Image: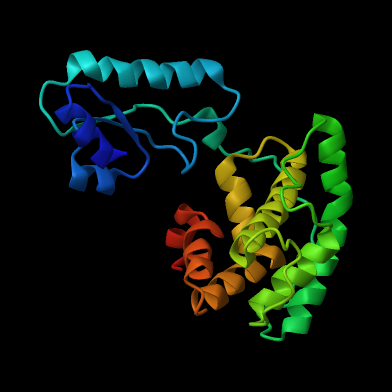
Amino acid sequence: MSALGHYLESAGIATICISLFRPHSERIRPPRTLWVPFELGRPLGEPGDGAFQRLVLSQALGLLEQVREPGLIMDFPRQAAGFADDPAWQPPALPAGPNGSRNPASLRDALAAEQEAIAPVYRQAVASRGRTTVGNSALPAERITEFLCAMASGTVPENPMPEQRLAIAMRLAADDLKAQYLEAASMGGRPSSRQLQHWFWDTTTAAQVLIRLRATAMASDDKILRAVAGGQLIPAEQRVRLGL
């Protein structure tokens, strides 16, 4: 989008870029940039917080009047409310994981046990909210476990979604797995997105499976599988934090 801003400006159309990754904006120097200190994927802040989102948009639009020097980056001065940690939050209790075991069967069994522990909390979350983001793969939890663990071990399993490429099936199954955990974990209070992400990627067997899956898929001869695994299985912020 930063590069597109230059193209549109050359046609006489004024542009504003809302940036989540400052180094990119510093390098590409779009005409007008508002840098926001939010989680990747949330350029306007937290979902559902309309007042805060309008504040971000208002400051971004204000750059049309304030910024006279091309390439100037203005900082948004506030953090999104949902990024404040809840010290009272209690994540779901999980069974002991495989402790870094490289045995694929151990990892599969540990993930199955973990999903069994997560399931009742997830159902409670769905009943409480009346909605869920799980279901894009249309696979039951047991099938997701089998499919992702098989791929993580280096096996090329039968595609459970034959209408999709294997890479897309992998991503949809992984998205459902992550969503189930994060929705269940949000029931223990009002955790920030940072708390949820750190809990998931630092403590769960599901995260171990996805980290191993990413490494295995990126070693594949399938360039589409490599591209999807490299950019979509693990959020960029967590890849940087975990050194992946």
Q: Position of residue 8 (x, y in %)?
A: 23, 30
Total numbered circles: 0
Instruction: Give above or below for 71 relative to 238.
Output: above
Residue 187 vs residue 215: left or right? right
Residue at image position (51%, 74%) is 222
Residue at image position (52%, 79%) is 220
Residue 41 vs residue 157: left or right? left
Residue 151 vs residue 47: left or right? right
Determine which quarter of the picture holds residue 28: top left
Q: Position of residue 198 (x, y in %)?
A: 58, 54
Q: Position of residue 180 (x, y in %)?
A: 75, 50
| The N terminus: image quadrant | top left
Determine which quarter of the picture holds residue 188: top right
Which residue occupies the foreground of this view, 202 or 240? 240
Instruction: Give above or below for 77 relative to 194.
Output: above
Q: Position of residue 67 (x, y in %)?
A: 17, 21
Res. 96 visible in picture: no
Residue at image position (60%, 62%) is 202
